[in-house]
Image (cartoon, grey):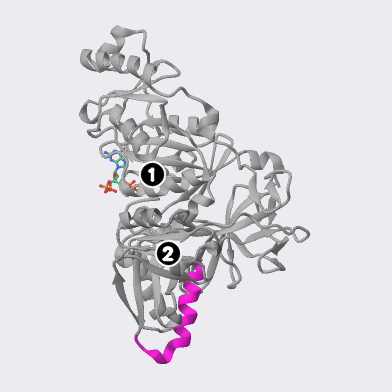
C-alpha cells in the first residue's frame, strides 16, 4: 500500500479533446508507448480491428465500426501515475463526452495543423472553460502541409477566446518540415521521421546562435523565416505565466507530429510539469481537500450492458479525495445508505482489472445494481456531503417518440426512464401533454439508434422516432420567478419540461434565442442545466 499523500500528488488526470481525425488516438497511443503501457503502438488503435477491442460493448458499435463509449487508460511515466480519459472521437459523440470532462483535472486539445479549430473541439472547449481547467494544445500533423503558424494561433485565440503561448515554433511543414525551435532552450530540435511505434528519435539540438550550422540543416530560406518569426513572436505573443495556464486562461502550444513520433515526449514532459495533481473540489460543505480528507468520489458516467453476457451496469467514479480500498464501506449520500462497492475495477480498454486500492485522481468502475445516478456522491460512512452536481448539457437533436405497441406501455416507460437515468438521452414533455407525448433530446444522433436498439433488445419495445427540427435548447434560469405564460416567444419556439419539471425552451434557429432574450427583459437562458 502506497503512502497516501505521495500517491495522490503523483497523479495526473486529463482528457484529450479534439475533432475526429485530428490525431487524438495516435497521440494517446504514443503517450502510452512512453509509459510502457503497451509494447507496440497500434494496439490502441487500428480503426477496423484493434479499436474494437478497446471499448465495444454494443452490437451497434460493431455494426458502425465506431466507438460509442469512452474508456480510461492508466499508465506510469517518470514517477507520475497518469490517467487519460478518452473521449469518443466520432462526430456522433454523446453527453458522456462532455461528462468525461467533469472528471478531468486538465485537458489536452489536439488540433490538425492543416485544419485549425473544428466544430467538436469548439463544443468540448466550452465545457473546459466552464470548469476553468488548464488546457494544453498540441498542434498535430506538422509532417503534412500546415496552415500558417500565426494564423493557427490566431484561430485558437479568436475562435476559443483563450490566449496562446507557443512553447516551441515549427520550421516549415509537410515535405519541408525541419523541426521546431524550443523557445526556452533557444535551440532548434531537428525533425526525424522515426518509424511508427519506436521511441522518439535522437533529434539534434542546434543552438539558434549557431547560424551556419542551422542553415546547413534547414536551408537559408527557412532559417530567415524562422528568425523573422521569432522576432515577431517575442514581441507579440502572451508571456508564459504558469498561474494563467493553471487558471485556464492561457494555453501553452506545442507543435509536432504524433504519427511520426515527433514532439510527443517533449510535450508530455512539459505537460506533466505544468499541470497539477488533483485539486480540491467543491461540495456543499465547502472545498474538499484531496489529501487531507478520507475517501470521496462522484459518479460521472453510467454505462449499461458493457458485457452482453452479464447485462450489468457499471458506474464510473472519479475519486476526489483519499484512498479507496476494495473492501471498505462507503456512504452513497443520495441513496442515504452505507454499502460495499461491488467488484471495483479499473476499466482499461476491454480489460477489467479488479482493484485493491485506488487514490484521488483515479477513475474506477463499480457494479451498479441500479441505485446510482449521474452526479451522486460517495464518501466514508461518517461523512455526509454532496459534490456539486454535474450539469446537463444541451442536446442538439430532438425527436418525438411513438410507441408502436400501446400494450407495452409499462415496459416502454420503464425502459426510457432507465436509459435517461444513465444519461444517454434526455426526455421532455410538451407542456400540458402528459407522458403521452415524449420528446427525446440527444447530443449526438447516434444516441437515437442506441435508444431504439436498446428498447427493442432489452425491453422488447418497438418505437418510431419522428425527427423534430429543433436544434437549440435553453434552460430558464431562476424559473420559479418567471411567468411562462407571459413569455413573448418566436414562431419557432416550443415550451417543454424535463423529468424534474424544469421548464425549457426549444428553438429551430439560433437567432431566435437572442430575439426571445431581447423581447423578455431580465430573462436569463443557459446552455447548461443544473441538476
Ligand atoms: P482521432 O482519434 O482524432 O480521430 O484521429 P486518429 O489518431 O485516428 O488519426 C486520424 C488519421 O490521421 C489517421 O490516419 C492517422 O494515422 C493520421 N494521423 C494522426 N497523426 C498524424 C500525424 O502527426 N501526421 C500524419 N501525417 N497523420 C497523422 P488514417 O489514414 O485515417 O488511419 P490509419 O489508416 O493510418 O490508421
Is disc 2 placed on a helix, strand or loop? loop
Q: Residues within 10 Å of mark 2 (few under 14, many from 20)?
A: some
The residue located at (46%, 70%) in the rendering is: 497
The residue located at (53%, 28%) in the rendering is: 242
Residue at which label 1 appears: 41
Identity of the residue furthest to the bottom in this view: 407
Q: Residues within 10 Å of mark 1 (few under 14, many from 20)?
A: many
What span is colored magenta in the figure? Answer: 404-422
Residue 133 point in image, percent of width and height: 52, 41
Identity of the residue furthest to the right in this view: 382
Residue 24 in which image quadrant: top left
- Label drawn at residue 487: 2
Above-or-below relation of 485 to 226: below
Residue 227 in which image quadrant: top left
Above-or-below relation of 242 to 375: above
Residue 197 in which image quadrant: top left
- Label drawn at residue 125: none
Q: Is residue 71 magenta?
A: no
Amino acid at each position: 500500500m502506497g503512502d497516501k499523500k505521495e500517491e495522490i500528488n503523483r497523479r495526473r488526470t486529463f482528457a484529450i479533446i479534439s475533432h475526429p481525425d485530428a490525431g487524438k488516438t495516435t497521440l494517446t497511443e504514443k503517450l502510452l508507448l512512453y509509459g510502457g503501457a503497451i509494447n507496440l503502438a497500434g494496439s490502441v488503435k487500428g480503426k477496423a480491428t484493434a479499436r474494437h477491442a478497446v471499448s465495444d460493448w454494443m452490437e451497434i458499435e460493431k455494426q458502425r465500426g465506431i466507438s460509442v463509449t469512452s474508456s480510461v487508460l492508466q499508465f506510469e511515466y517518470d514517477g507520475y501515475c497518469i490517467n487519460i480519459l478518452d473521449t469518443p472521437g466520432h462526430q456522433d459523440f454523446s453527453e458522456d463526452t462532455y461528462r468525461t470532462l467533469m472528471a478531468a483535472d486538465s485537458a489536452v486539445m489536439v488540433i490538425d495543423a492543416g485544419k485549425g479549430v473544428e466544430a467538436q473541439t469548439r463544443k468540448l472547449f466550452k465545457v473546459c472553460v466552464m470548469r476553468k481547467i488548464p488546457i494544453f494544445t498540441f498542434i498535430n500533423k506538422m509532417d503534412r502541409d500546415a496552415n500558417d503558424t500565426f494564423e493557427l494561433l490566431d484561430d485558437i485565440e479568436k475562435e476559443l477566446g483563450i490566449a496562446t503561448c507557443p512553447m516551441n515554433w515549427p520550421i516549415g511543414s509537410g515535405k519541408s518540415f525541419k523541426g521546431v525551435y524550443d523557445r526556452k532552450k533557444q535551440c532548434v530540435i531537428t525533425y526525424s521521421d522515426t518509424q511508427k511505434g519506436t521511441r522518439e528519435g535522437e533529434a539534434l539540438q542546434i543552438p539558434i546562435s549557431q547560424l551556419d550550422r542551422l542553415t546547413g540543416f534547414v536551408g537559408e530560406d527557412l532559417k530567415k523565416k524562422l528568425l523573422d518569426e521569432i522576432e515577431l513572436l517575442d514581441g507579440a505573443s502572451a508571456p508564459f505565466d504558469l498561474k494563467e495556464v493553471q487558471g485556464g486562461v492561457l494555453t501553452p502550444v506545442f507543435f509536432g507530429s504524433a504519427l511520426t513520433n515527433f514532439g510527443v515526449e517533449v510535450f508530455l514532459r512539459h505537460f506533466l510539469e505544468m499541470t497539477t495533481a488533483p485539486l480540491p473540489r467543491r461540495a456543499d460543505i465547502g472545498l474538499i481537500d484531496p489529501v487531507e480528507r478520507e475517501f470521496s468520489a462522484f459518479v460521472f458516467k453510467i454505462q449499461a450492458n458493457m458485457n452482453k453476457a452479464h447485462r450489468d451496469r457499471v458506474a464510473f467514479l472519479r475519486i476526489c479525495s483519499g484512498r479507496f480500498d476494495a473492501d471498505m464501506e462507503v456512504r452513497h449520500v443520495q441513496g442515504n445508505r452505507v454499502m460495499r462497492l461491488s467488484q471495483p475495477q479499473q476499466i482499461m480498454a476491454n480489460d477489467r482489472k479488479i482493484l485493491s486500492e485506488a487514490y484521488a485522481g483515479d477513475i474506477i468502475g463499480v457494479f451498479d445494481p441500479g441505485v446510482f445516478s449521474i452526479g451522486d456522491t460517495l464518501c466514508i460512512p461518517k461523512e455526509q456531503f454532496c459534490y456539486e452536481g454535474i450539469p446537463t448539457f444541451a442536446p442538439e437533436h430532438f425527436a418525438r417518440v411513438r410507441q408502436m405497441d400501446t400494450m407495452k406501455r409499462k415496459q416502454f416507460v420503464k425502459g426510457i426512464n432507465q436509459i435517461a437515468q444513465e444519461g444517454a438521452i434526455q426526455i421532455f414533455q410538451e407542456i400540458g401533454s402528459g407522458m403521452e407525448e415524449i420528446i427525446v433530446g440527444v447530443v449526438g444522433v447516434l444516441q437515437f439508434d442506441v435508444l431504439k436498439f436498446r428498447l427493442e433488445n432489452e425491453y422488447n419495445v418497438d418505437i418510431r422516432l419522428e425527427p423534430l427540427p429543433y436544434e437549440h435548447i435553453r434552460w430558464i434560469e431562476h424559473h420559479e420567478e418567471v411567468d411562462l405564460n407571459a413569455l413573448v416567444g418566436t414562431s419557432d419556439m416550443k415550451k417543454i419540461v424535463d423529468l424534474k419539471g424544469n421548464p425549457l425552451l426549444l428553438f429551430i434557429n439560433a437567432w431566435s434565442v437572442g430575439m426571445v432574450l431581447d423581447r423578455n427583459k431580465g430573462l436569463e437562458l443557459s446552455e447548461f442545466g443544473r441538476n
